[in-house]
Image (cartoon, helix red, strand yellow):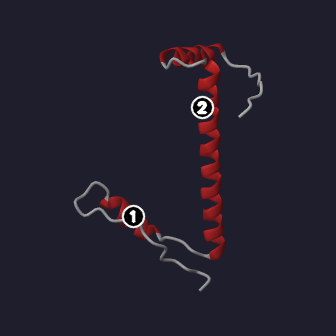
């Protein structure tokens, strides 16, 4: 795949960290920056999709009650840890 040039202004400390990471991983600063940008954008895409799904569930009137969430959280780290709760509130139905 062809690449294109991009100029970015960085704070001196960020540039130093970028160059140090590149040196430690035997990569160029551009390779480290590209990987970091790609990972950041991928994370943003995942977050947007999660928000979209949550908004759709809210519009559909599908919710998990506070009580169910509390039981689940209280079970964390115990021998009887519960699976994530299923929706149990359906106001539109």
Q: Which residue is mark 2?
A: 36
User: Is the N terminus in the top left, top right, bottom left or bottom right quadrant?
Assistant: top right
The one of 51 and 73 positioned closer to us in this rendering: 51
Q: Tell me, yes or no, whether the two marked residues, 2 and 1, touch with CB atoms within 8 Å.
A: no
SS at mark 1?
Answer: helix
Q: Quadrant of residue 31?
A: top right
**What number is the disc on residue 51?**
none
Whether residue 40 sits left or right of residue 1 in the image: it is left
Please indicate whether residue 30 sits to the left or right of residue 65 in the image. right
CA gap, disc 2 to disc 1?
36 Å
Q: Residue at x 55, y 18 (%)?
A: 22
Q: Which corner quadrant holds the C terminus?
A: bottom right
Residue lying furthest bottom: 93
Label 2 vs 1, first from the N-terminus: 2
Q: Nearer the viewer, residue 31 or 43?
A: 31
Q: Position of residue 9 (x, y in %)?
A: 74, 20
Q: Which residue is mark 1?
A: 70
């Amino acid at each position: 795949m062809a690449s294109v040039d991009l100029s970015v202004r960085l704070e001196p400390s960020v540039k130093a960290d970028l160059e140090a990471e590149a040196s430690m991983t035997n990569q160029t600063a551009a390779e480290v920056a590209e990987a970091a940008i790609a990972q950041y954008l991928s994370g943003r895409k995942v977050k947007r999709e999660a928000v979209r799904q949550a908004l759709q569930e809210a519009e559909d009137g599908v919710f998990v009650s506070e009580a169910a969430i509390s039981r689940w959280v209280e079970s964390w780290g115990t021998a009887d840890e519960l699976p994530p709760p299923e929706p149990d509130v359906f106001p539109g139905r």
